[in-house]
Amino acid sequence: MQFPFKTPYAYFPIISSLICTTLYVLLVYQPCISIAANRKATNDLDYHTAPVFSSSSQTGAATRFFPLKQDNNKLPEFTAVYNISYPYWHNIWSSQDENIIQHNLLGLRVKKEQNYVWDWEYNRSNLTLAGESSHASTAEYYNINSFLPASAAPNKKDNPHKITAVVSTGSSQWELGYELVPSQYISLLDSATPDQETVRAKWSNRLSDDVNYHISGSWFRDKIGDASTATYRTYRSNPEAGVIVQKILGNPDAALIVNYSQSNREGGSSEGRDGSWTIGYQDIWGKVNVQTSLSHTNSRDSSNRMDISRNNTITYSAALSASYKQGRYNITPSLTWGYYQQNDLLNFEQEKTYETSLAIDTSEHGAAFSSVIKLSKKNLISPSRGDSPQWFANLNIDWVPPFLTKNPGSKLYFRAYINDYKYNTAPHNNYRETSYNVGISQTF
């Protein structure tokens, strides 16, 4: 008997090839797949609601719902990207008459990278020396949302260097560091920032088992070499000193922290300086962890030797938290109160901000379920801008249901956010923002 089409057995080589190819992609190329349904609405005084696309990042080329990436030492790296997004789930299969925006992304990038790293370390007695140098070369071809021939980016080569030294002498320790990252260096294997030169030094000393102090500083400049794109060179210096006193009044859980830091910057016709004192205290009262902090900062910025801003600020915060175990769940409630005051010395104005927040963190043993809920109330008091009360709430839930336990890296998630902002002097500017996000994520 002759069939007008191939028998099912004839498709076996094709089906098996597709299965093998899929497994090869999952194991070798390791794509990261994320599927999410998003809904975001902004409500004004009339409570009008409009769809807002919020399922991907602000940069289209960074939106990769289904990427396929190959990285090999011998072959060039290539990334193929395709993405289609709608504001709501029903827009995918429904053709309702709505004013919606469909987001599509199609791209291809081919990159050939070469990165060589040399590191060394020398240890002897109380001295440790370490260094690292790197050489990187990058050639890149890219094509996003276009079927035209790919364009080529210029090759970039440069060599960064880093040296550190640690000297220990009894109760003291010296740390010295130098780092140079040229302007054309492309970081392939690390997170170095190009076009900067930094020198660091720190001295730590232990007066006793309960008293430690340190003095440190750093110096920075950019516009390294003629290839730098910076308009002018910027210098920064950051001296700092601090002391930590433990077991205050014989209390083994009490600690007092005092720190002073200064930031100096200069570039072009502008310069600035910030000086900040911080005093912190932490303790444990029964089962409650207590943390308080008080800081005072003076800042000044000028241009062409004329002041453009002069401020001093006071910040205070107090936090209480405790941890309890209820069956399989760990519950951690926390309460935070904060106060912020800024004095504008040029315009003779003062602003104050009060904030109170309550959070409950719940997690299940084995990380099958976790949730964080937070409620906050903030009030800004400003003579020039007017008082502005605000309240907001966050809810984050992560759950691994039983049918996903055999698939490591999978989880369901839910995110909710509400932000309500009011202007006492301009009620027509009041708004409320509500955002919901639910989806499933898979990490290979």
Image (cartoon, grey):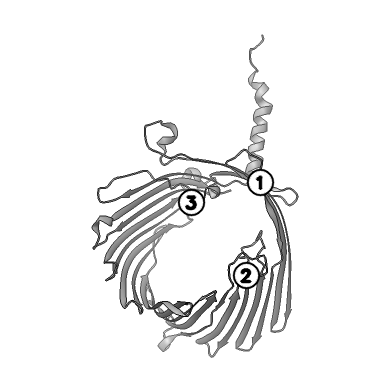
Of the numbered discs in the image, which one, if any, rests on residue 58?
3
Name the front one of labels 1 and 3: 1
Q: Can residue 383 be seen here?
A: yes
Q: Is residue 93 above or below residue 343?
A: above
Give the residue displayed 66% in from the left and 26% down from the top. 12
Q: Which of marks 2 and 3 is in front?
A: 2
Label drawn at residue 62: none
Q: Give the SS element for disc 3.
A: loop
Dot 2, crowdedness within 10 Å: few (<14), some or many (≥20)?
A: many
From the image, tell me which residue sits under label 2: 223
**Alpha-carbon span between mark 1 and mark 3:** 23 Å
Amino acid type indicated by mark 2? Lys
Q: Where residue 369 sits in the image (x, y, percent)? A: 44, 53
Residue 119 pos. (x, y %): 73, 69
The amino acid pointed to by label 3 is Gln
Which picture quadrant has residue 121?
bottom right
Q: In this view, does 235 lie to the left or right of 394?
A: right
Residue receiving disc 1: 151
Residue 17 x %, y %: 68, 32
SS for tag 2? Answer: loop
| Amino acid under disc 1 | Ser
Left or right, 351 with respect to 116, comes to left
Q: In the picture shown, does residue 167 fall above or below 363?
A: below
Q: How far apart are the two marked residues, 2 and 3, measured between alpha carbons?
A: 29 Å
Say if mark 1 contacts mark 3, CB within 8 Å.
no
